[in-house]
């Protein structure tokens, strides 16, 4: 499902998230106060704007309240990071993801309403982007730019059916590597394996096909 994202702060992490979301076909508004950062990403996202996101009027003028998800990726200015997160939540954005530098910073972001706190490691931007796109993806490992292994919460419509009945490879181009339920793991399940409530599916597929799975 196509979503609209606004990414504020275009350092290494923010740029990586923005480019990955855009490459997967989503609408992305990228914002940074630095002209060179905006120029560098302009051809890779839907819109790139030079603006000071600490000014609420700028955010309102850009229509960010209409976006599905906001990612606050500012890392070097903690005050701005917290202020912008607070303003976005007050403006009514449903889901705000904020980058934190420390555990204390993360707790402050939680207090002002951030829905998800990210403590980015090197090159974590791509992984975070994939997790944001599809809410039933629990974890994700990139095998290549196009293929991934993902842990997926079992879609409701799969419960009670066997892998043979679901025929995921034909319908979704997805291969199930394992089925996990608590401590029990069924590796390389056969077509007779039945999907139960609370099962976690470990699948391998193209990224675009994983996103098409029902929730």
Image: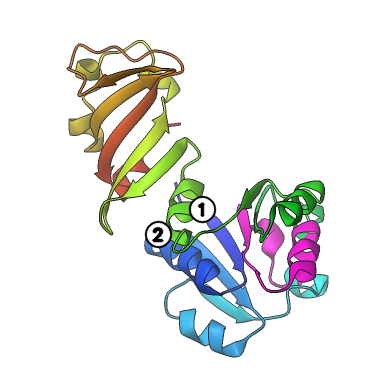
On whether residue 111 falls in the magenta region, the answer is: no
Per the rendering, the mark at residue 25 is 2
Q: Which residue is mark 1?
A: 3
Going 62% across and 65% down the picture, which residue do you hit?
73
Mark 2 and mark 1 in contact? Answer it, CB < 8 Å.
no
Q: Is residue 131 above or below residue 101?
A: above
Number of residues whose C-alpha sits closer than 10 Å to that of mark 1, classed few (under 14), some (14–19) or many (20 or more): some
Going 46% across and 18% down the picture, which residue do you hit?
198
Q: Is residue 213 visible?
A: no
Going 59% across and 66% down the picture, which residue do you hit?
7
Q: Is residue 139 above or below residue 132?
A: above
Picture coordinates of residue 153 (x, y %)? Answer: 44, 28
Q: Report whether 96 appears left or right of 202.
A: right
Q: Is residue 45 above or below residue 88?
A: below
**Foreground pick, 54 / 22:** 54
Picture coordinates of residue 77 (x, y %)? Answer: 73, 73
Picture coordinates of residue 202 (x, y %)? Answer: 32, 31
Per the rendering, the mark at residue 99 is none
Number of residues whose C-alpha sits closer than 10 Å to that of mark 2, classed few (under 14), some (14–19) or many (20 or more): some
Q: Which residues are magenta?
A: 61-87
Q: Is residue 25 above or below residue 204?
A: below
Q: CA distance from mark 2 to mark 1?
A: 9 Å
């Amino acid at each position: 499902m196509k979503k609209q994202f606004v990414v504020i702060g275009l350092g290494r992490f923010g740029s990586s998230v923005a480019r990955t979301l855009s490459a997967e076909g989503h609408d992305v508004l990228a914002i940074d106060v630095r002209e060179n950062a905006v120029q560098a990403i302009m051809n890779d996202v839907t819109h790139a704007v030079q603006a000071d996101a600490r000014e609420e009027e700028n955010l309102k003028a850009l229509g960010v309240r209409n976006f599905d998800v906001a990612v606050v990726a500012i890392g070097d200015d903690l005050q701005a990071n917290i202020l912008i997160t607070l303003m976005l939540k007050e403006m009514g954005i449903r889901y705000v993801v904020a980058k934190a530098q420390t555990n204390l910073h993360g707790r402050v972001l939680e207090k002002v309403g951030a829905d998800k706190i990210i403590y980015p490691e090197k090159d974590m931007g791509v992984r975070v982007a994939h997790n944001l796109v599809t809410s039933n993806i629990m974890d994700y490992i990139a095998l290549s730019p196009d293929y991934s292994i993902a842990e997926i919460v079992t879609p409701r419509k799969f419960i009670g059916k066997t892998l043979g009945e679901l025929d995921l490879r034909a319908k979704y181009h997805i291969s199930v590597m394992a089925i996990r339920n608590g401590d029990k793991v069924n590796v390389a399940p056969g077509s007779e394996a039945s999907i139960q409530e609370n099962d976690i599916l470990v699948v391998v597929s193209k990224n675009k096909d994983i996103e098409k799975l029902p929730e």
